[in-house]
Amino acid sequence: METELTLRVDGATHHLRVDTRTSLLDALRQRLGATSPKKGCDHGQCGACTVLVGGRRILGCLALAVAYDGAEVTTAAGLAPGPDEDHPVHRAFVDHDAFQCGYCTPGQVCSAVGVLDELERGWPSAATADVAGGPDLGDPEALDREIAERMSGNLCRCGAYKGIRAALAEVAEGVRR
Amino acid sequence: MTATLEPRAIGRGLARRDGGAKVRGVAIYADETPVPDPLFCRIVQATVARGRVSDVDTAGATALDGVVGVMTSTEAERLASTDDAELAVLQGTEVGFRGQIVAAVLAETDEVAREAADLVRVTYAEEQADARLSADRGDLYTPESVNPTYPPDTHEGDVAAAMAEAPVTVEQTYTTPMHHNNPMEPHATTALWEDGHLTLWDSTQGVHPVRQTVTQIFGLEPEQVRVVCPYVGGGFGSKGNPHANVIMAAMAARAVPGRPVRLALTRQQMFSLAGYRTPTIQRMQLAAERDGTLRGIAIDVVEQTSRIKEFAEQTGVPTRNMYAAPNRRTTHRLAALDVPVPSWMRAPGECPGMFGPEVAMDELAAELGLDPVELRIRNEPEVDPETGKPFSSRNLVACLREGAARFGWAGRDHRPGMRLEDGWWVGTGVAASVYPTMRMPKSTATVTYDGGRYVARIGAADLGTGTWTVLPQIAADALDVPVEDVDVLIGDTDHPEASVAGGSSGTTTWGSALVEAVREFRDKYGEDPHDGDAASGSVNPNAAEEDYVMSAFGAQFAEVRVHADTGEVRVPRLYGVFAAGRIVNPRLARSQFLGGMTMGLGMALHEQSLLDPRTGHVVNHDLAEYHVPANADVDDLQAHWVDEDDPYVNAMGSKGIGEIGIVGTAAAVANAAWHATGVRVRDLPVTLDRVLPAR
Ligand code: FES
Ligand code: FES
């Protein structure tokens, strides 16, 4: 069975017809050629397919495209304000060499942007000491624990975790200031 | 001895040239290659480990709208070469292992292809499978050689006599489980057969090796096959050789001329088709004097291969070169089982083969009441114990000392199970790392001058290793021009032939080819070339290999905490210090070392593929059940290196760094877990059920 839907991806509007079984990830990658989000497992186990919908991170492989009719999807390719500009997370990832092969990276970058937003909103995580008070961004060690916890859904087989943590901490510092 | 390049760009921690593309996700990987109107190929895998396919019912699949074809061994084209049973896809009805490709579906969309693959009904005449590895099997055999070409066994002196006479001995068996590489990018190919010409956009560690295999198997000329791979989403050895999926993709494309075909393995399929590290059983013997001097050292290895194709992991090989001892023995025995075909995984040989020996050394140190760092220093050989040749450079002792200083090893109480802090047993451990410095025999580069820039071409690969960035640094120093003026193009068989990115040999091999090409170029055109001037050069054999043994060394230090009630194991600190020649790009090298150590942490704590011997099936075949380290598993992780000036290895003065980081990590962690709890874990991984102190 097929159905029609509209997706806004990185600012561009697309009307498409998809098999109703199509995941959001496959709609992006296979129908629209938006291959910034990657497929590492197709089962919600690796985070490579992470995109932002309405600013919140979701796993594209666990989302059915039909459930996202009209949604505003942002991939790592669409985060920068302009084609020749960087998002601060992009820059920090390159500076801290927060990747090697680059395959998990667009998912990490989207996740990172989502995490920074969660932290700014004061949302707690399993690593938050005072759940009611929210994450303690003033304490570098607490911040590191928050980042490690919140980024643990994005696997990196190249083992770039240290760089990823440093990159996020740097951007989080900037956000706080 | 080669003249070592004056380092100007070499040694600088330049950011990755492909960084901007990767952080945006616009670097194109194999399955994403923009092609018009592709078909999707999905494979059907054997559900028995041994037997014959008696019938394939394709009716349900072909009846689906959008299915273009179903390929079985009856319809599939006959291959020109079927010598390699792993790659003889759909050439017969015999099943060699569970998960083997027995059919494939081509369809207009991925969803339809997947549904159709589910509808293919395969019937088997099943035979009793034999998939249980054990050291007691009666049919273990000695392979002719172990990977790649080492003799399987070595003997010197009499280890049995040394064991009988020595005042202190260690005799234990250690095991490492089956491991899967699991690069984040699943193995994938986009293939197009058009006008007698095959193009493969393949995720591979070597475009030329893929072309060579594919031309052989399909009986094509090299000019008929182009393989392209600018970026690889990790490989760690599993993409070092083309596996059956690549042949399947090419075969599917040849069945639909003019139509591109995409074939990406699923994560689950990778556990039977993309290679893996064999489980190993390592019987260790150490015979020592009271002062720790080794009189004898032996490792007897039992491991598995597939009944249809041999791969013999060289697990015993590092023991040949590590420590001095007059009496020595290393042996390898294989069981040929009804299991998937094992292959390369990061540091084959060294990685599993430095677990048993390095834990045994820790056990010996404990027996002697000696500092395990000191024990290793006392057994440091003057020359390579196996060949008697000197090492071109060997700085294991410097790594041990530097690591001990950084880690705060001095004053360690060597007794185990003594430190309980806030409900956690705390301990520290050390182990040594080693990895040979390899150079592949074939690689060629060209250098062209064009519009004020130098452009070098070589069919090399960047699997996250930094080739896009590091080769320009080498070329720039060879040319004596700013690195900004140099481009190096890789990842395409249209470029000159390059060797596989394996054995940590890439920078040595390709860099040497570049240096030769530059020398030719300067000889021909001098310092002031004209547009279009071009020259090529190839890697030469290293004459110094006759006289010297070349290896990188390292030392890893781990702190382990084991929760006294739950047995949860944490590694709050893991420091590695390496001696690996000159570091071409510190920023990228650090990532390589840390990445290797992180994978070693996974080996220590999490990774094990559980193969059900009754069915030959890896039951935990996904990333929810085959655990690799996640972000929060990594804590204070540090990589350092000692300066090493080695004039013999190559013009860059560099040694391979991609694999050594995983070597020794698991032993350091297991040793630290013992120091924490007093429980000696000899079977990886160090899980809570194994390490919790008995009460
Ligand atoms: S591809 Fe979606 S989580 Fe792995
Ligand atoms: S950069 Fe390779 S998997 Fe993360």
Image (tube, rainbow, N blue to C red):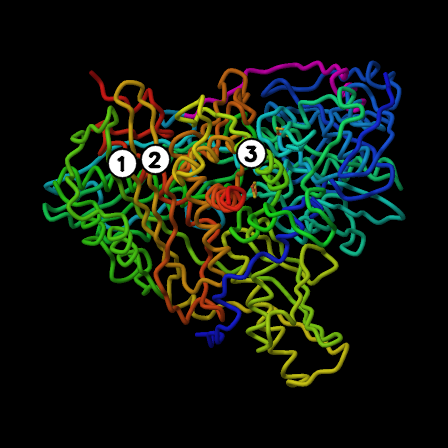
Q: Position of residue B539 (x, y in %)?
A: 57, 67
Q: Are marks 3 and 1 in contact (CB under 8 Å)?
A: no
Amino acid, disc 2: Val
- Tell whether circle 1 marks a residue whose Cβ is less than 8 angstroms from ligand 2: no
Element type at mark 1: helix
Q: Are marks 2 and 3 in contact (CB under 8 Å)?
A: no
Amino acid, disc 3: Val
Element type at mark 2: strand
Residue in front for this viewpoint, B596 or B285: B596
| Res B672 label | 1
Residue at the (35%, 55%) spot, across then down: B553
The stretch drawn in magenta includes residue B37: no
The stretch drawn in magenta includes residue B124: yes
Q: Position of residue B522 (x, y in %)?
A: 63, 81
Marks 3 & 1 on one chain: no
Judging from the image, mark 2 belongs to the subunit labelled: B
Residue in front for this viewpoint, B591 or B162: B591
Viewer can see residue A159: no
Q: Is residue B531 above or below residue B399?
A: below
Amino acid, disc 1: Ala
Residue at the (63%, 33%) spot, across then down: A40
Quadrant in the picture for residue B604: top left
CA distance for labels 2 and 3: 25 Å
Name the residue that disc number 3 marks: A115
* Quadrant observed for ligand 2 in the rendered image: top right
Considering the image in quadrants, where does the C terminus of chain B appear? top left
Q: Are marks 2 and 1 in contact (CB under 8 Å)?
A: yes
Q: Position of residue A54 (x, y in %)?
A: 69, 29
Give the residues drawn in magenta, as a range.
Answer: B112-133
Name the residue that disc number 2 marks: B571
Judging from the image, mark 3 belongs to the subunit labelled: A
Q: Residues within 10 Å of mark 3 (few under 14, many from 20)?
A: many
